[in-house]
Image (cartoon, rainbow, N blue to C red):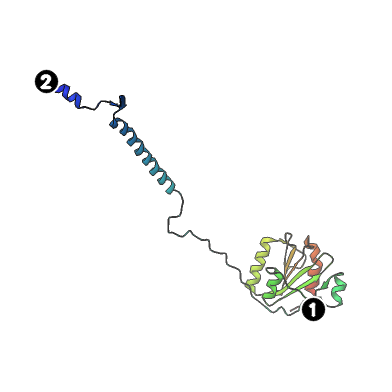
């Protein structure tokens, strides 16, 4: 019985192994910690991947949502019935507005109210004045277009009074633009960097309303 125990003990690996005259840890004792460390590293790596994929990233192969473009308003109108020469040429403008004169040629800036007036069968006029160049748009938008334009101008400008009960007028101090919608459906828009307040543009607007046909 004693010999059996001695033989079994001899077969068990000693925690220290003699190698080249030195005692070294048994290979099995060194491998176990390394395997544990590798297993833990794998678990942490997988956890990191799961955390990263749990965010709000777009799944592979899918197309991110694209915002729909804002539709461009469309306006229409009928012939306003006057030309720039009809309104501003002659001695009347010189007497009523000293220093004002009609430009011989004028192209309204793209995106301006004068350019829009010309597109809906109106006219765009350019003036010189003591306070600087002025662009003028004269048109007769249809009912839906007039309502949309008035709503847009009211949203960006301040109301102006003194032109009569059936007239809607607004002034935008950021752009120096004053818009006036008459009782006969005419839209008058004047713009200049010299229009620092609505009173500066008032004489011009009053002159235009008097020069327009009454019908």
The answer to whether one can see residue 95 in this image is yes
Who's the residue at 78% across and 60% down the image? 197
Q: Along the horizontal axis of the image, is 56 left or right of 182?
A: left
Who's the residue at 81% across and 72% down the image? 207
- As drawn, the residue found furthest toward the front would be 20
Q: Quadrant of the N terminus?
A: top left
Give the image quarter of residue 40: top left
Q: Position of residue 7 (x, y in %)?
A: 16, 24
> Marks 2 and 1, how far apart in space?
133 Å
| Residue position marked by numbered label 1 in the rendering | 85
- As drawn, the residue found furthest toward the left would be 1
The answer to whether one can see residue 166 in this image is no
Q: In this picture, is 93 found above or below 155?
A: below
- Secondary structure under tag 2 reads loop
Q: Position of residue 137 (x, y in %)?
A: 73, 72
Q: Position of residue 48 (x, y in %)?
A: 42, 43
| Residue position marked by numbered label 2 in the rendering | 1
Q: Are marks 2 and 1 in contact (CB under 8 Å)?
A: no
Q: Along the horizontal axis of the image, is 54 left or right of 103?
A: left
Q: In this picture, is 214 found above or below 190?
A: below
Q: Along the horizontal axis of the image, is 156 left or right of 212?
A: left
Q: Nearer the viewer, residue 130 or 196?
A: 130
- Secondary structure under tag 1 reads helix
Task: For label 1, count other residues whose C-alpha is less than 10 Å away and answer few (under 14), some (14-19) or many (20+).
Answer: few
Q: Earlier in the sequence, mark 2 or mark 1?
A: 2
Q: Nearer the viewer, residue 43 or 1?
A: 1
Q: Position of residue 172 (x, y in %)?
A: 72, 61
Who's the residue at 71% across and 78% down the image? 80
Dot label at residue 134:
none
Give the image quarter of residue 42: top left
Q: Quadrant of the C terminus?
A: bottom right
Task: For label 2, count other residues whose C-alpha is less than 10 Å away and answer few (under 14), some (14-19) or many (20+).
Answer: few
């Amino acid at each position: 019985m004693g010999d059996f125990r001695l033989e079994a003990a001899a077969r068990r690996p000693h925690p220290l192994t003699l190698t080249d005259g030195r005692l070294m840890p048994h290979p099995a004792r060194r491998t176990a910690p390394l395997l544990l460390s590798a297993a833990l590293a794998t678990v942490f790596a997988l956890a990191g991947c799961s955390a990263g994929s749990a965010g709000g990233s777009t799944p592979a192969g899918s197309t991110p949502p694209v915002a729909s473009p804002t539709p461009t308003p469309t306006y229409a109108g009928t012939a306003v019935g006057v030309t720039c020469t009809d309104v501003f040429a002659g001695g009347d403008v010189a007497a009523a507005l000293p220093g004002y004169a009609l430009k011989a040629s004028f192209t309204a800036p793209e995106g301006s109210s004068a350019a829009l007036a010309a597109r809906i069968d109106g006219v765009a006029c350019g003036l010189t004045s003591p306070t600087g160049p002025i662009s003028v748009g004269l048109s007769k938008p249809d009912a839906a277009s007039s309502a949309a334009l008035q709503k847009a101008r009211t949203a960006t400008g301040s109301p102006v009074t003194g032109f009569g009960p059936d007239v809607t007028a607004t002034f935008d101090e950021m752009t120096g633009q004053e818009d006036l919608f008459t009782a006969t459906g005419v839209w008058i828009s004047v713009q200049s960097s010299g229009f620092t307040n609505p009173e500066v543009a008032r004489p011009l607007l009053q002159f235009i309303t008097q020069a327009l046909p009454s019908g």
